[in-house]
Amino acid sequence: MFYREAGQFKTTYQADQAIFPILQDRMGIAVIMVVALAIPLFASDFVLASIMIPFLIFALATVGLNVLTGYAGQLSLGTGAFMGVGAYACYKLTTIFPDVNIVILVLLSGIFSAGIGIIFGLPSLRIKGLYLAVTTLAAQFFLEWCFIRIPWLFNYNNSGAIEVPERTGFGDMVLAGPASPPITRYYVVLAIVVVVTFIMKNVIRGRIGRTWMMIRDMDIAAELMGVRPLFAKLSAFAVSSYICGVAGAMLVFFWLGAAEPSSFSITVSFQILFMAILGGLGSLIGCFYGAAFIWILPVLLRTLLPSMGLDIASETVEHVSRMVIGALIIFFLIVEPHGLARLWQIGKEKLRVWPFPYA
């Protein structure tokens, strides 16, 4: 009975509607936050720059996709393109407003991505399922073409790439650019991810989130009950695209340092979709599970295999890691089709009656 809910009484509506009403959940979140804040104390710059920062960014992008696909039931294959819109918008904003804090520009860049998401979300009012997926796939290809063929987006750079300029904020701290230390970028990314995830948790538990889930489960019945499909679907596209746009801006400004249109290709869209499916659709914590599984595990495999004394070429290590990850994805989806988040829920149910084997 380690995960015990009995005896935790609530005396106010505010306490009853808390995001984490159970004491063990609050303790677990507190431990996770302490560990996240303490990671730079014992982790190297390589771990921060190559593992933790991209993990948080991809987790946030998965949250954006999960809002649209997991909660609103609208299948999308254009996540990479929406991330690219945020990245290029942030790049143009840094050119127009060079003295504005880069964190503010990153958050503002998501607005442009939300607008593009609403435009390409209009077909969802008439079609759904695989037909909508084809529409978002067309958006992916069209936006990629724009990134390549419109030189204004990359300031007429001959290479066609966007390069992150050095930007300071919060005093003299270098937040972006070649001189920015990984620990600074890590804390900035962590703060943005925590705040956005916290806000989305509240939105999903509120009226807007419930309308998304009603549209997902049975759109015709939801419309008969008074839910407006126009607002529900387009708001899901807007919120999802905003989060993906912010993640795309962070991908370039806090991790890569420079990017080409290929950085937001269809491969990125499928990678984030796999993170959402493997972690569990309709679960925010599943986004972090899926991102950790898809991103951190391959990095660990590529690091551990050579360290075991095996004389393996780097290309072979890359292929072996892909094979192992693919096999594990198939295994986990066979064991639990609802993703790793469902396994965590089953674990909590077992802890409710532990050490007894029955309820």
Image: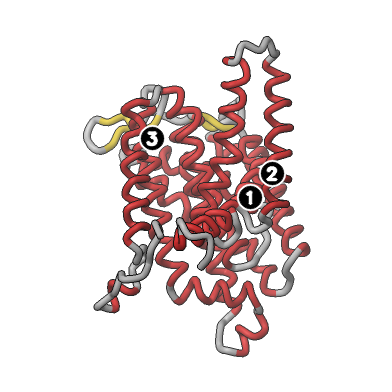
Of 26 and 60, the residue lying toward us = 26
Q: Where is residue 215 in the image (x, y as percent from the top left)?
A: 61, 76
Of 163 and 324, the residue lying toward us = 324
Asked if residue 337 can be seen in this view, the reply is: yes
Quadrant into which the N terminus falls: bottom left
Q: Mark 3 points at which residue?
A: 186
Q: Residue furthest front?
A: 356
Q: Where is residue 333 in the image (x, y as percent from the top left)?
A: 70, 51
Q: Which amino acid does label 1 sit on?
A: Leu
Q: Characterize the local packing of mark 3: few (<14), some (14-19) or many (20 or more) Cα atoms within 10 angstroms.
A: many
Q: Where is residue 263 in the image (x, y as percent from the top left)?
A: 61, 36
Count of marks placed on residues: 3
Q: What residue type is labelled 2?
A: Ile
Give the mark, 2 or 1, whose residue is nearer the N terminus. Answer: 1
Q: Mark 2 points at which residue?
A: 329
Q: Please tell me which residue is depicted at 47% across the width and 48% down the height of the picture.
A: 246
Q: Residue 278 carries which label?
A: 1
Q: Where is residue 90 in the image (x, y as percent from the top left)?
A: 46, 43
Q: What residue type is labelled 3?
A: Tyr
Q: Please tell me which residue is depicted at 31% across the width and 71% down the height of the picture.
A: 7
> At numbered mark 3, what does the secondary structure look like: helix, strand or loop?
helix
Judged by depth in the image, the label closer to the viewer, 1 or 3, is: 1
Q: Please tell me which residue is depicted at 73% across the width and 26% down the height of the picture.
A: 319
Give the mark, 1 or 3, whose residue is nearer the N terminus. Answer: 3
Q: What's the distance in space between the residues labelled 1 and 3, CA to CA?
A: 25 Å
Asked if residue 88 can be seen in this view, the reply is: no
Of 53 and 106, the residue lying toward us = 53
Check if mark 2's residue and mark 1's residue have beta carbons within 8 Å: yes
